[in-house]
Image (tube, helix red, strand yellow):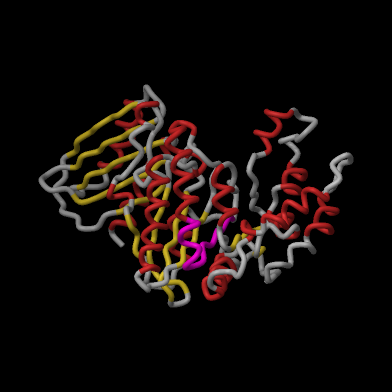
């Protein structure tokens, strides 16, 4: 069990929030909601230790295309980087619906 | 019963939130203590287990067939749908609030979507206490309004929560569902592979499977894995109201059944259907 936090610069205000996924084996839960102030904050709790660099790479890629000022909480049960990115994109889609 | 496999909308493939939503009348569902309220288990983090923001228990208030109802759905994919302190408290509180509404003259039915292995082992005694409270709350509510248990699969309903299912007014299963006190692996572990081979899927479903449970009179409805069929069956139970006699009140019937069973030889599941399926007619059959 490891807790990881990241901050990213983000300017765009968002209004919607989204909850997707489940903390089941190989999957994860994403809670995305609007955040006051400039910047996005990511808070990750993962059952698999030692993958901070991988999380950073996934988040860097996600925030290279997304500029919403949001708080993202991830509860992870061993999802692969691909699943993480898909869940994040799903959360964005739901929040903008 | 048979519906087009391609065009049906699977109930089993829905997560707990979508299952609860699908049973309530359109536009009436309102989630209570949702994931953004972040009422999660305080015990899992201490043991290195990632918690879920709703503790795997979804509570939704709304209407079914135009009548007030609360749906409580357990998420089988999170920790096997196990009952911890928080998920247990959410389920108990939902039943108690429904009971309080009934006493104030506003009949409120409860639907429990149980996909659970029972007590969450990481929360041990708190989970046991939670299940005792749930059972007490079911007994209080079922006098006023029906408590409907739905187990669709794929987890099934085992352990202490099978007792909660047993106390409910109506039990609705699919062929994929399993319902039993001790799961196959527990029986094999405790009594040996000769007693129960937990790798034998045909054996498991012949004992615990939804079809067998229904055929032996231990469930009230057997439906296809189809969201509309499940929702319609739930609606019918809500409209039916409190049963004249609850299954769990028929103590002498079940005592006599067990007393009459010759355990000196091996019974097979079809024989049990023939013997028990016909003797449970004290209660009106659907």
Residue A27 visible within the image: no
| Residue B93 % position (x, y) | 37, 53
- Considering only vertical position in the picture, is B97 above or below B46? below
In this view, the residue in front, B210 or A36, is: B210
The C terminus of chain B sits in image quarter: bottom right
Determine if the magenta segment contains residue B141: yes
Determine if the magenta segment contains residue B131: no
Q: Which residue is drawn at 34% across and 26% down?
A: A2
Q: Residue furthest bottom?
A: B66
Q: Residue furthest front?
A: B252
Q: Residue furthest left?
A: A37
Q: Residue B212 vs residue B118: left or right?
A: right
Q: Residue at x 60, y 48 (%)?
A: B156
Residue B255 visible within the image: yes
Image quadrant where residue A97 sits:
bottom left
- Considering only vertical position in the picture, is B186 above or below B210? above
In this view, the residue in front, B238 or B242, is: B242
Point out the stretch of residues depicted in magenta. B138-151
In this view, the residue in front, B250 or B25, is: B250
In this view, the residue in front, B286 or A21, is: B286
Q: How many labels does the image show?
A: 0
- Considering only vertical position in the picture, is B75 above or below A48? below
| Residue A46 % position (x, y) | 37, 31
Q: Residue B2 vs residue B147: left or right?
A: right
| Residue B73 % position (x, y) | 46, 54
Q: Residue B224 vs residue A78: left or right?
A: right
The N terminus of chain B sits in image quarter: bottom right
Q: Residue furthest right?
A: B265
Image quadrant where residue B9 sits:
bottom right
Q: Which residue is drawn at 67% across and 63% down?
A: B222
| Residue B213 % position (x, y) | 70, 55
């Amino acid at each position: 069990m490891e807790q990881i936090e990241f901050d990213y610069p983000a300017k765009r205000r968002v209004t919607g929030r989204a909850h997707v996924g489940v903390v089941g084996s190989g999957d994860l839960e994403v809670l995305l909601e609007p955040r006051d102030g400039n910047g996005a904050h990511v808070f990750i709790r993962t059952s698999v230790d030692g993958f901070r660099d991988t999380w950073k790479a996934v988040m860097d890629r996600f925030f290279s295309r997304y500029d919403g000022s949001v708080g993202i909480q991830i509860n992870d049960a061993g999802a692969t980087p691909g699943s993480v990115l898909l869940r994040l994109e799903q959360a964005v889609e739901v929040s903008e619906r | 019963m048979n519906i087009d496999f391609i065009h049906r909308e699977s109930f089993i493939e829905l997560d707990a939130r979508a299952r609860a939503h699908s049973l309530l009348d359109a536009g009436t569902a309102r989630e209570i203590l949702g994931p953004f309220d972040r009422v999660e288990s305080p015990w899992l983090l201490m043991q290195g287990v990632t918690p879920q923001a709703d503790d795997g228990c979804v509570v939704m208030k709304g209407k079914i067939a135009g009548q007030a109802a609360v749906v409580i759905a357990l998420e089988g994919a999170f920790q096997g749908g196990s009952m911890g302190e928080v998920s247990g408290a959410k389920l108990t509180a939902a039943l108690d609030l429904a009971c309080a509404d009934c006493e104030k003259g506003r009949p409120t039915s409860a639907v429990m979507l149980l996909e659970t292995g029972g007590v969450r082992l990481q929360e041990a005694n708190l989970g046991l206490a939670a299940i005792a409270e749930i059972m007490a709350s079911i007994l209080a509510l079922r006098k006023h309004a029906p408590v409907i248990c739905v187990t669709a699969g794929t987890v099934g309903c085992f352990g202490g929560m099978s007792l909660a299912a047993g106390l409910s007014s109506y039990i609705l299963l699919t062929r994929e569902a399993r319902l039993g006190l001790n799961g196959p692996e527990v029986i094999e572990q405790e009594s040996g592979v000769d007693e129960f081979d937990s790798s034998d899927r045909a054996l498991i479903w012949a004992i615990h499977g939804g079809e067998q449970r229904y055929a032996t009179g231990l469930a009230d409805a057997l439906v296809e894995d189809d969201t509309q069929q499940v929702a319609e069956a739930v609606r019918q139970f809500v409209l039916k109201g409190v049963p004249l006699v609850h299954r769990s009140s028929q103590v002498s019937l079940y005592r006599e059944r067990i007393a009459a069973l010759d355990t000196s030889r091996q019974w097979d599941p079809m024989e049990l259907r023939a013997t028990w399926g016909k003797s449970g007619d004290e209660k009106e059959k659907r």
